[in-house]
Image (cartoon, helix red, strand yellow):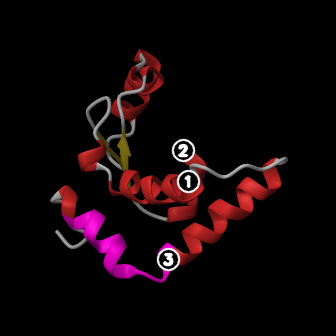
């Protein structure tokens, strides 16, 4: 995390789900000690409606759901191909962001 701060050159905003590791006492103490440059927003345990990437991954999984392959490399290529297709559809990406009610420009 400290390396990320050096690379970012400024404050960091972190959005986390409530995985146990994220809630551990040591992690909470680290966050509290570094509150001057680290802001953490914790999502509910599973909140696909607040996480636009869930919609994107659902499109990817739909594409490869019935894919029968003999090796992992083909799965990787199929995922990369689908993500590349979605990349050129900002309307799709924006639709999932809009669906969360969140904004990039608050």
Quarter of the image with the N terminus is top right
Report x, y in % for residue 62.
Answer: 49, 55
Report x, y in % for residue 60.
Answer: 52, 58
In the displayed structure, 72 sits above or below 56; it is: above
Of helix, strand and loop, which one carries label 2?
A: loop
* Magenta residue span: 86-98
Of helix, strand and loop, which one carries label 3?
A: helix
Of helix, strand and loop, which one carries label 1?
A: helix
Q: Which residue is mark 3?
A: 87
68 and 99: which is toward the camera? 68
Q: Which mark is residue 39?
A: none
How many marks overall? 3
User: At 84% from the left edge and 47% from the top edge, which residue is drawn?
Assistant: 70
Contact (Cβ within 8 Å) of mark 1 with mark 3: no
| Quarter-of-image position of residue 84 | bottom right
Q: Which mark is residue 1?
A: 2
106 and 94: which is toward the camera? 94
| Quarter-of-image position of residue 99 | bottom left
Q: Which residue is mark 1?
A: 4
80 and 40: which is toward the camera? 80
User: At 59% from the left edge and 55% from the top edge, which residue is drawn?
Assistant: 64
């Amino acid at each position: 995390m400290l390396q990320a701060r050096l690379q970012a050159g400024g404050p960091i905003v972190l959005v986390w789900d409530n995985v146990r590791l994220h809630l551990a006492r040591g992690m909470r103490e680290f966050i509290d000690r570094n509150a001057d440059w680290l802001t953490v927003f914790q999502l509910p345990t599973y909140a696909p409606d607040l996480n636009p990437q869930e919609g994107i991954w659902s499109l990817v999984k739909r594409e490869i759901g019935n894919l029968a392959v003999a090796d992992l490399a083909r799965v990787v290529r199929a995922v990369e191909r689908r993500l590349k297709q979605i990349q050129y559809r900002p309307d799709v990406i924006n639709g999932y962001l809009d669906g969360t009610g969140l904004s990039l420009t608050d």
